[in-house]
Image: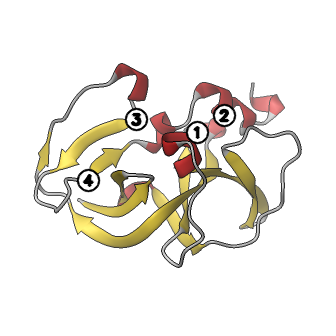
Amino acid sequence: MLALAFRAGDALLALAARDIVEVLPRVPLRTPSLAPAAVIGLLPFRGTLTPVVDLCLLVAGRPSARQLGTRIIVVRIGSGDKERLVGLQAEQVSELIDCERTARGLHLPEHAWLGEHVADQPGLPQLVDPSELLPDALIALFTDRADA
């Protein structure tokens, strides 16, 4: 399996390539009114406004650095009629890594989105499950009222 490595604060993480729709440069976003702090904007993407969440704010409590390696990773969350695109802004989005061998790390119930570590990569990046990454309160914001 291939995964895209990135950072959110000090955390070295990776998303399975199968979960990624597209990787975009950091672009100007439309500011959402009264959104939670982690929702940093709305991205016009493929005919819709896609919410973008800053993973550094969510994971490390600080905004992503404004650097060349900071990117927006567009992923799908949910399934079927409730599927929605969400942008995840992260730092040092750099390379696809091979995830043939993984090693189990700590199981943290409050962070169910953290998966196994990629055993054969420097720094042992931890796989992230995008469907579990965002708190339910944020996911509810991204669901149409008709879907509720």
Q: Nearer the viewer, mark 4 or mark 1?
A: 4
Instruction: Tell me the amino acid under the disc marked 2.
Output: Leu
State the CA–CA distance, disc 3 to disc 1.
20 Å
- Please say if 40 is above or below 122: above
Q: Which residue is mark 3?
A: 113
Instruction: Tell me the amino acid under the disc marked 4.
Output: Pro
Q: Which residue is mark 2?
A: 138
State the CA–CA distance, disc 2 to disc 3.
14 Å
Q: Earlier in the sequence, mark 4 or mark 1?
A: 1
Q: Which residue is mark 1?
A: 80
Residue toward you, 30 or 79: 30
**What residue do we see at 64% from left, 36% from top?**
82
Colour option used: secondary structure
Quadrant of the image containing the N terminus = bottom left
Residue 102 in percent (x, y) is at 14, 47
Q: Nearer the viewer, mark 3 or mark 1?
A: 3
Q: Earlier in the sequence, mark 4 or mark 3?
A: 3
Q: Which residue is mark 4?
A: 125
**What residue do we see at 71% from left, 42% from top?**
37
